[in-house]
Image (cartoon, grey):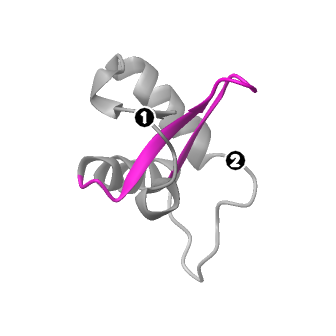
Amino acid sequence: MIVPWQALDPETLDNLIEEFVSRDGTDYGEQEYSLSRKAEQVRAALSAGEAVLIFSECSGQCNIVPAEQARDWKQ
């Protein structure tokens, strides 16, 4: 299910974003960014509607995905 990022406690959102940007395999470009810069970019993408939070009831895990990948998810 898609979870509105605005509905989360700010600390919870910060923790989700920090966990997301610190995962292995999240560096894909030639330029490396600090974790804080990556977190800013993810927060901006969420704010702009370019990314969404997805919660899997089956696994109990949350992920951040591009909005276009989430179009088929039901809210």
Closer to the camera, 26 or 48? 48
Magenta region includes residue 32? no
Q: 16 above or below 25? A: above
| Three-letter amino acid code of the residue under disc 1 | Gln
Query: Residue drawn at (52%, 33%), measured in percent from left and top?
Result: 1
Answer with left or right where residue 42 lies relative to residue 44.
right
List x then y, in percent, for residue 6: 27, 29
User: Which corner quadrant of the image does residue 63 belong to?
Assistant: top right
**Mark 1 or 2, nearer chain start:** 2
Which quadrant, please, contains the C terminus?
top left
Dot label at residue 23 = 2
Locate residue 52, reporting x and y percent. 42, 46
Q: For the point 51% across and 53% down, which residue is it? A: 72
Query: Disc count in the image?
Result: 2
Where is residue 49 shown, x and y percent of the image?
A: 28, 53
Q: Position of residue 37 (x, y in %)?
A: 41, 55
Query: Which of the two residues, 72 or 39, is positioned nearer the viewer here?
Result: 72
Q: Which quadrant of the view contains residue 27?
A: bottom right
Mark seen at residue 13: none
Q: Secondary structure at mark 1?
A: loop
How busy is the neighbourhood of tag 2: few (under 14 within 10 Å), some, or many (20 plus)?
A: few
Q: In this rendering, which labeled residue sits more in front, label 1 or label 2?
A: 1
Q: Which residue is mark 1?
A: 75
Q: Residues within 10 Å of mark 1 (few under 14, many from 20)?
A: few
* Image: 62 above or below 23: above
Secondary element under disc 2, as helix, strand or loop, is loop
Dominant secondary structure (helix, strand or loop) of the stretch shown in magenta: strand
Mark 2 and mark 1 in contact (Cβ < 8 Å)? Answer: no
Residues at marks 1 and 2, CA–CA distance in whole angstroms: 26 Å
Q: Which residues are magenta?
A: 48-65
Q: In the rendered view, would you say 42 is above or below 14?
A: below
Q: Amino acid at mark 2?
A: Arg
